[in-house]
Image: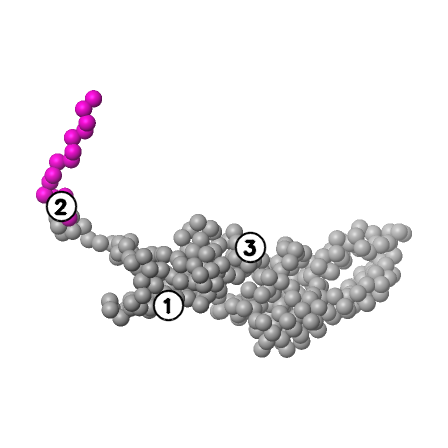
Amino acid sequence: MSAPSPPTSDASSTPNSLESTYNPSNKYYFSGKMIVLLVEKTSFRVHQDLLIRSSQIFADTLMVPDGENNSQTLDGHPVIQLTDTEEEWDIFLDVFYGSVEADSLEDTSLGNVLRIANKYIFNKISKTCESYLQQKVFPYDRTSGHWFSNYIPYVKIVLEHNLLYMMPQAFYEAASLEVTEIITLFKKTRPELLVKFLAGRDKIATVVAGFAADGISGFLEGGCTVQDESCSGIDAFLHYTTKMAPQWRTRYEPLAELQSIVSGAEIDRLCNTCREKVGQASVSFQAEIWADLPSVFGLAESWAELQKYRIE
């Protein structure tokens, strides 16, 4: 079998004729230039064009005329010395080049990526990280229970980057920490917000007791409508709230506390009708607590007011 013939030379396929036929894309026509980022003891050789188009900081740094750049080179490429950590840039470049999705990151890696993205104004990656935080960790409509075993690493991310529209959720999760842990957390991130946080934390501690008082009033007005002999109605609820009051005053998770009331399992001597009534009142009160979180912590009057701080 004979070897295939080489392609026939044609004047129309020469570089000069192609350049006159095709116009370079304004979006995807990279120069092929590389830049080396020096981070601690590690060097990262990356595409200069991609950095320029993705980051305002790198665009300002690298778009200077030839001859004004740093004269140092590595492997024939210009270098930039950075003061970040190798760990931060390693995971950031994984996200930047698409080998890792931002919404798959654990808390430490997510914090590292967001730190680099915000510092060098990679707005698209910043928005992706923040969207993940809001949708998966601190959603606006979460009114009960816990989805993560430990929210505090994510709270640190919100505080470090001053993500105001997620601050009420972060404050709520931090409220259950010991005072010494709280002081350490805020000193390392946002010491100027500590007073607001502590004032709101004090209010959070009184929430369930307030619900209990309202709930008792509700029972007094309605009573047990089915006349179930096994139902103690208001007496059962009084017994439960009296027993729980000392614990409520030392705990700072009213949504979880109210969720246990919703289930009704902890309140003895209530008929199904009264148990359902308490549950409905608990659900309604959970929604009120969540709606009031921004004002409880002195951050804003409403969730809507905080939306203006989101990256668009």
Q: Residue 78: name its quadrant.
A: bottom left
Q: Earlier in the sequence, mark 2 or mark 3?
A: 2
Could you say where residue 299 lies in the image, as x and y percent from the top left? 58, 73
Could you say where residue 279 lies in the image, as x and y percent from the top left? 74, 56
* Residue extent of the magenta highlight: 1-15
The residue at 62%/60% (across/down) is 151
The residue at 70%/63% (across/down) is 253
Q: Name the residue under label 2.
A: 14
Spatial CA span between label 1 and label 2: 39 Å
> Please, which colouring scheme is shown?
one colour
- Left/right placement of residue 173 relative to residue 308 reads right
Three-letter amino acid code of the residue under disc 2? Thr
Q: Nearer the viewer, residue 29 or 9?
A: 9
Q: Mark 1 points at which residue?
A: 57
Three-letter amino acid code of the residue under disc 3? Glu
Q: Residue 11: name its quadrant.
A: top left
Classify mark 1: helix, strand or loop.
helix
Q: Earlier in the sequence, mark 3 or mark 1?
A: 1
Q: Mark 3 points at which residue?
A: 106
Spatial CA span between label 2 and label 3: 51 Å
Could you say where residue 35 lies in the image, as x and y percent from the top left? 33, 60
Does the segment drawn in magenta span residue 30?
Answer: no
Check if mark 1's residue and mark 2's residue have beta carbons within 8 Å.
no
In the rendered image, the residue lying farthest to the top is: 1
Is the residue marked by circle 2 packed among few (<14), some (14-19), or many (20+) residues within 10 Å?
Answer: few
Classify mark 2: helix, strand or loop.
loop
Q: Residue 192: name its quadrant.
A: bottom right
Please indicate, yes or no, whether residue 308 appears anywhere in the rendered image: yes
